[in-house]
Image (cartoon, helix red, strand yellow):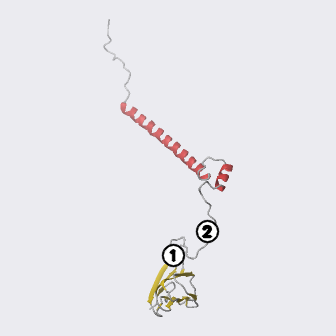
């Protein structure tokens, strides 16, 4: 048997492991990107479908959704329209503009209470006492005069809020014909109320 000495034996070339690894990594990255994009689209479609439906009725037909939104569930009550209240907080979280008058204590022999702005006032004759009113544009001050008609004691407070700024004044009286007289006066600048001195 003779051997050819001049020709080299031919063997199949071995694949380059670096190129093969890079190709596999590229294919894996493309597959991951496609899976991620498909899941993002799926989540977006599910969220959109859920926002179109009434709460608790994802995938319900339009007739089912309209029935669900009109029919209260067991154990719940439907609130009627909210009535405006002069003393309720404003949407911004600050106290509403206005004046609140309060007097507490004991007046077994009677009490005379006068309260209101400089432009006019109101009367009350019992404790505890609370009243609230809107600000009057022309008012120069707000006050309470709570006069005892014999024994007892009384504490009064005025709280005024204007443009989000709150000022309070208080006063007390005890026995006889003494009176509590807190007052809040207007300043020279707009919305600058202060306790009267």
Q: Quadrant of the C terminus?
A: bottom left
Answer with the quarter of the image where residue 136 lies. Answer: bottom right
Crowd band around label 2 with a 10 angstrom C-alpha radius: few (<14), some (14–19), many (20+): few
Q: Residue at x 59, y 56 (%)?
A: 75
Q: CA distance from mark 1 to mark 2?
A: 18 Å
Question: Which residue lies under the disc numbered 1?
Answer: 95
| Residue lying at the far front of the rendered structure | 108
Looking at the image, residue 64 sits to the left or right of residue 161; the answer is right
User: Relative to 1, does residue 22 appear above or below in the rendering?
Assistant: below
Judge whether 182 appears above or below 62 on screen.
Answer: below
Residue at the far right in the pictured view: 63
Quarter of the image that includes the N terminus: top left
Residue drawn at point x = 59 percent, y = 74 percent: 85
Q: Position of residue 113 (x, y in %)?
A: 53, 88
Q: How many marks?
A: 2
Position of residue 58 in the picture relative to residue 21 (left or right): right
Write the residue at 48% across / 79% down.
165
* Label 1 SS: loop
Q: Position of residue 65 (x, y in %)?
A: 65, 51
Mark 1 Cα-neighbour bin, 10 Å: few <14, some 14–19, many ≥20: some
Mark 2: which secondary structure?
loop
The answer to whether 39 is drawn above or below residue 78 in the figure is above
Q: Toward the viewer: 141 or 42?
A: 141
| Picture coordinates of residue 11, whole percent (x, y) | 36, 20
- Give the image location of residue 126, x and y in percent: 54, 85
| Observer-nearest of 131 and 62 | 131
- Residue that carries the numbered disc 2 in the rendered image: 82
Q: Choose mark 1 or mark 2, whichever is in front.
A: 2
Which of the marked residues, 1 or 2, is nearer the chain's N terminus? 2
Q: Which of the two residues, 92 or 77, is positioned nearer the viewer here?
A: 77
- Specify whether 117 is left or right of 151: right
Asked if the residues shown at circle 1 and circle 2 are in contact, with their CB atoms under 8 angstroms apart, the answer is: no
């Amino acid at each position: 048997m003779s051997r050819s000495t001049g020709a080299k034996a031919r063997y199949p070339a071995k694949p380059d492991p670096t190129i093969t690894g890079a190709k596999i990594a590229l294919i894996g990255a493309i597959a991951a990107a496609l899976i991620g994009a498909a899941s993002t689209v799926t989540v977006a479609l599910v969220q959109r479908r859920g926002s179109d439906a009434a709460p608790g009725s994802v995938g319900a037909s339009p007739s089912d959704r309209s029935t669900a939104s009109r029919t209260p569930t067991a154990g719940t009550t439907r609130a009627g329209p909210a009535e405006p209240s002069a003393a309720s907080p404003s949407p911004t979280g600050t106290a509403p503009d206005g004046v609140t008058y309060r007097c507490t204590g004991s007046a077994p022999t009677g009490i005379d209470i006068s309260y209101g702005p400089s432009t006019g006032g109101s009367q009350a004759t019992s404790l505890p006492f609370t009243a609230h009113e809107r600000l009057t544009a022309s008012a120069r001050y707000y006050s309470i005069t709570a006069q005892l008609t014999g024994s007892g004691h009384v504490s009064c407070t005025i709280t005024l809020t204007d443009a989000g700024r709150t000022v309070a004044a208080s006063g007390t009286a005890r026995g006889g014909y003494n009176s509590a007289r807190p007052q809040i006066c207007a300043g020279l600048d707009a919305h600058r109320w202060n306790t009267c001195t």
